[in-house]
Amino acid sequence: MRFRIGLQAQFFAMVGFAILAASALMVLFWMRQQEVQTTVEGLSRQATDQVLDANLRRRADGTAEQLAKALVNPLYYFDLDAVGDLAKSTLRQPGVRYVLVYDADGNILHDGTADIPTYGRRMDDALAFEAIGARELHAQTTRDILDVSAPILIGGSRLGGVRVGFDRTEGRDFQQAAMTQLRQQIRDLGHRQLLAILLLSAALLALGGVVLALIQRTLVHPIGELADSARAIEAGHFDTGMPVSRRKDELGDLVRAFGRMSYSVARHDREIRRMAYTDALTGLANRLAFREMLDARLMQLNGAGRELALLFADADDFKRINDTLGHDAGDEVLLQFAHRISDTVAEMGGADARVARFGGDEFVILVEDGDVRAGATQLAERLVQVLSEPLVVQGRQVFLGTSVGVTLYPEDADGATALLKNGDIAMYQAKVAGKNCYRFYSRAMNEAVERRVHLENELRGAWDRGELRLVYQPVYRLADQRLVGAEALLRWRHHEQGVIAPSVFIDVAEQSGLIDTIGPQVMRAACGDAVLWEQARAADAEPLFVSVNVSPRQLRSGDLARMVEASLRDAGLSPDQLHIELTETAVISDEAHASQLLTRLRSLGVKVWLDDFGTGFSGLSHLRRVPVDGVKIDRSFVADVLRDPDDLALTTAIIAMAHSLGITVVAEGVEKEGQYALLRERRCDLAQGYWLGHPLEMEEFLALVAEEVVA
């Protein structure tokens, strides 16, 4: 009864408030009309100003940029007549107040007039400072002037610049007419709004009386019953009794639908709870269920002097299954994986052991019976053994293996979050150790992970801080021992730790994804340096190439060709002077994709070399299917070529086979004169190594290039 009276009171209040509000609006409307008109007019004026300025800015930018390009040759040859013709032509354009062409020091060379009264004077107006220093298109405004300046560049050198001043006062007449029309439209709109308010107030008053008479009989009581039932469901009483109605209208349908919904909610609640705690693919407990169970077990074990172990099992190279056989095959592999884990845990884990799938190819096992450390060790060994056995998927045998990380409670941590983190760290260390093995968590592992994270954070800003730099190892032609190019090598001198080995930070960059940022920076820098080499050589000298290593992650990204093309274009380097080096293992891991990408690179004119050839177990047959211009014999073969007949035979075979396919052969790691002589005898094309030259800083390499020119 109280609820029914409250609803009526609320409705009375709403109707009264609506009537009062309508009356107040009629009074306030006239008071606010002038203020609204002024505000709208101001905003409209501001908007038209912005539109006019934007149009003028686009025109000014285009005029200044076009004029700057047209002035390059006249200014380079100091042809003042040509400069004057261009300036006069621009000055005659509508709305142009002035044109100033100036040299790199800001001295005026031409102002578009016949006698050039300002010639030789340094620009000293309020806008001159920013215009002189601008290295790109630059705009400045005063109340009546839009000043746009553009540098005049040739190559990387700045010859000077041009300033064009445009009149901002044009268009004011158009704006004034538009504002007059807008004011009249606002007045008309105000009259219509007032009439609408009056009509609405009258209609609201009449409607309120009619609806109030019906509201109690048709809505209040049924809604009250539904509200009581809804509160019961909200409290979790899904089986509570529902109101019954024989009404044939929508409210009756609502009451009956509410009853059916209550039954359905009770049924689905049970199903949802089951789904929320179960992995859909394997039927195992999921992360949420395992975490709740783990929290409960830790509360029971707190202070009881008992232990438990968590084992994190992660399939090795599972992504390869999805990439090669498809996701359906991947799901089948995960099912077989889960069954083997469940069977092994049921056999060895004890009655209280639990298995959960945390997502992807990661499974977690809880063990707490008997000697926990010994039991976890035996279970981990058995899991590694069982999961390394081949799986049969779609009629094919698949070999995966697993990496297992083990953490103990309370030895390693006394909380669920820390235990889960430690288990993940131990599993990662098992993968680092070579995969298909297990590792127990130790605090040293945590420190190693923290060091790696710290190294990754430091690497993020290393290029901008100038800590990363390129050095160049010379590459010589064996036939005449002439310098033909250099390999770009990345080095990192940390501001605190000193020199960090490339084998360390390149791996961090690859796994963290930073190589996607560092790789293009290296490519652009190497192309720019190669252009400087050519400027230091005689015009008729043989061009030098620069070879740049590309990581497997860059090869998989699909943007490599566009990045290379942009780097060549920005640096102005001829494509045939850039060699891209890819490791053999990166290419053969996805030969179809790599072949397509390498074909696109070669279509640009870039040469492609296969690095570390002979270490990927690919065989020479791959040279017929992968479009490459050269192979680099791995240094491990060159190192023993003088004393190991097998390495000599393999090296000779690589050279002969590559030459038969028209492929250049490069030997790396040449550190002895005998190696050089033997490779030359076997007709190897190019070589690099410490005997020929150490990696050099840019200045040192330029000096070497100069010596070659003199020689």
Image: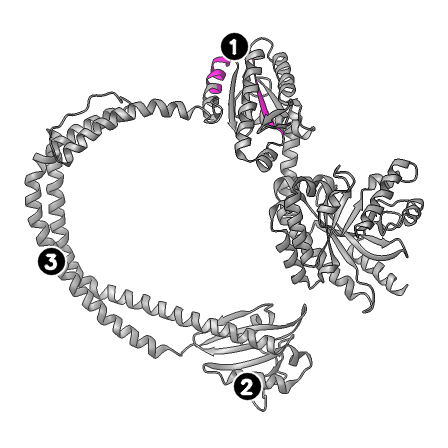
Going 14% across and 57% down the picture, which residue do you hit? 197
User: Alpha carbon of mark 3 to alpha carbon of mark 2: how far?
Assistant: 65 Å
Residue 357 vertical placement versus 684 (above, below) = above
Q: Residue at x 63, y 79 (%)?
A: 107
Q: Earlier in the sequence, mark 3 or mark 2?
A: 2
Q: Closer to the observer: label 1 or label 2? A: 1
Q: Is residue 648 magenta?
A: no
Residue type beneath disc 2: Lys
**Marks 1 & 2, CB-CB < 8 Å contact:** no
Dot 2 alpha-carbon crowd within 10 angstroms: few under 14, some 14 to 19, many 20 or more: some
Dot 1: within a 10 Å radius of its alpha carbon, few (fewer than 14), some, or many (20 or more) residues? few
Query: Circle 3 is placed at which residue position?
Result: 198
Density class for disc 3 (Cα within 10 Å; few <14, some 14-19, many ≥20) is some
Q: Nearer the viewer, residue 553 or 488?
A: 553
Q: Which residue is mark 2?
A: 88
- In which quadrant of the rendered image does the N terminus lie? top left
Distance CA(mark 1)–CA(mark 2):
95 Å
Q: Are marks 3 and 2 in contact (CB under 8 Å)?
A: no
Q: Quadrant of residue 316?
A: top right
| Viewer-nearest residue: 333 or 440 | 333
